[in-house]
Image (cartoon, helix red, strand yellow):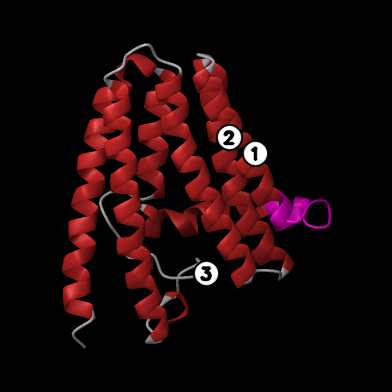
Amino acid sequence: MFDVRLRPVSARLLGPLAERLVGRVSATGLTLAAVVVGLGAAVCAWQQLPAAAVTAWLLARLLDGLDGAVARVSGSAGDAGGYADLVGDVVVYAAIPIGIAAGTTDDTLWPITAVLLATFYVNAVSWLMLSAVLEKRSAGAAARGELTSVTMPPALVEGTETIVFFTVALAVPSIAGPVFAVMAVAVAVGVGQRALAARQLLRR
């Protein structure tokens, strides 16, 4: 919901650090580091280490933001990097809820986690297919002046909201069930938003 407005702000804030990192670490290296640290957050959640899990999760998100900033500053931004970044995000987004569920003795959390991951699955198809069609019609990221490799049609839950939801669930695993339930509903609403957008956009 807030990603489009926050990306330029993030780019400005991360720009100075990205300039210092150019020549020291590649954008691809940062992408891989974000995935490894993100998976580490899931492992910490599994081992019931909430402080470490939150720290690793937020560090992973920082690295995830830096990879694109470094790529732009160094002039190495391209489709391969965007592809790797997106796949890495999906891997971590799947691992975090599983790690939280694995670290709890509450058996009711597993069905809720399954529903959440199912909404992620449908959500990914809903925006990736719409994005692909818009890019094919030359109405994608470049045409819209977006900083991402491909356009990301807006919805109620995007990257910013995911960071908030997962941070809360990692910090307080005892309330992960309600957090995941609310997030699943919100993601489903986003799927509906994109379905309505597709109905309008794809008629043209």
User: Of the residues shown, which amino acid type is indicated by label 1?
Assistant: Val
Of the image marks 3 and 1, the number of the one nearer the N terminus: 1
Q: Secondary structure at mark 1?
A: helix
Amino acid of disc 3:
Ser
**Label drawn at residue 36:** 1
Q: For mark 1, does the 10 Å Cα neighbourhood hold few (<14), some (14 to 19), or many (20 or more) residues?
A: some
Which secondary structure, mark 2? helix
Camera-side residue of 118 and 143: 118
Amino acid residing under circle 2: Leu
Residue pictured at 73% horizontal, 66% vertical: 74
Range of magenta residues:
18-29
Residue depicted at x 27% and y 30%: 112
Q: Which residue is mark 2?
A: 39
Q: Which residue is mark 3?
A: 149
Image vertical order of residue 177 relative to residue 187, above or below: above
Q: The residue tagged with tag 3: helix, strand or loop?
A: loop
